[in-house]
Image (cartoon, rainbow, N blue to C red):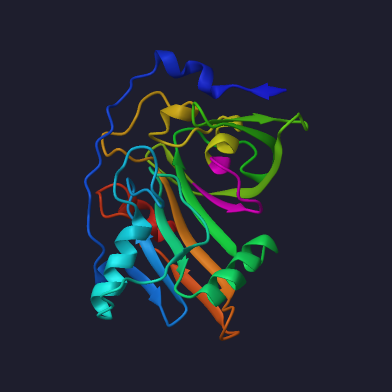
Amino acid sequence: MDYRPWSKISTMTKVPIKYINHEITDSDILYEDNHLIAVNKRAGDIVQVDETGDESLDDKVKKYIAKKYSKPNGAFLGVVHRLDRPVSGVILFAKTSKALERVNALFKSRDMHKTYYAVVRNRPYPEAGNMVHWLVKNPQKNITKAYDHEVAGSQRAELNYKLVGELNGWYLIEVDPITGRPHQIRVQLSTLGCPIVGDNKYGYPRGSLRKSISLHARKLQFIHPIKKEPVLIIAPVPKDGFWEKFERMM
């Protein structure tokens, strides 16, 4: 079966996207040591440079480090994972090549544990479960299709989810992705009949005026690749008058 929430896109309300650029400050930093730095990404930031030409988050973090530690020749920063542009939450960078190599290994071995929260308008059924799909990304249209069986060019995608709260007809879902595929959580929740609020690319009836979708990368848990100590990084939710109502449920 080919799931096609994107087939409705042409009839949906399209919101022109214009993001505000913000410098990185101390208040954006969730964790930092000599090897790693974690940032609470704003919805709208791109992690790496793309065709828009907008300043990327990794460049802004490099500037932050260079200024903080007086590095006139710039700072090394390794990108180890990404979040979609309209998604907020914790993102981790490596400050040394050694840390980059070891954190990449953590992601590859699935020893980097990620927890996301999504707000949807439809109650999921079942309220908790495991989902497996095969995803195919169309890079020209920047959209991913989900299939319930393997097809040519597909990648296996798996996640666990559970309903954790409800507020005035809005439902909060906790998501633990086991794999990390492009747009994975967005398209898999859509196949469940629960498109993420604001995500008109994957079936929500309209885009968000905040230029964001209601998906937040809340936690990263791992064993530090150098110090060999457990690390838990938690990203506060955006202060936008909406997300704060759900934080007590997390």
* Picture quadrant of residue 187: top right
Screen quadrant of the N terminus: top right
Q: Is residue 48 left or right of residue 240?
A: right
> Would you place residue 113 above or below residue 152 in this image?
below
- The stretch drawn in magenta includes residue 186: no
Task: Name the outermost residue toward the right.
Answer: 150
Image point (28%, 33%), residue name:
17
Between 16 and 246, the one lying in front of the other is 16
Query: On the rendered structure, is 235 left or right of 65?
Result: right
Please tell me in which quadrant of the rendered image residue 18 appears.
top left
Q: Position of residue 112 (x, y in %)?
A: 60, 65
Residue 62 lies in quadrant: bottom left
What range of the chain is rendered magenta? 173-185
Q: Is residue 39 visible?
A: yes
Q: Is residue 130 visible?
A: no
75 vs 127, nearest the viewer: 75
Q: Quick check: 23 left or right of 40?
A: left
Closest to the observer, 134 or 94: 94
Q: Position of residue 228 (x, y in %)?
A: 60, 84
Position of residue 219 relative to residue 189, above or below, is below
Residue at position x 76%, y 29% from top?
151
List x then y, in percent, for residue 63: 28, 66
Residue at the farthest top position: 11
Q: How many marks?
A: 0
Residue 49, image x and y in percent?
Answer: 38, 48
Residue drawn at x 52%, y 66% is 220
Task: Tell me the residue at 50%/73% (across/down).
Answer: 232
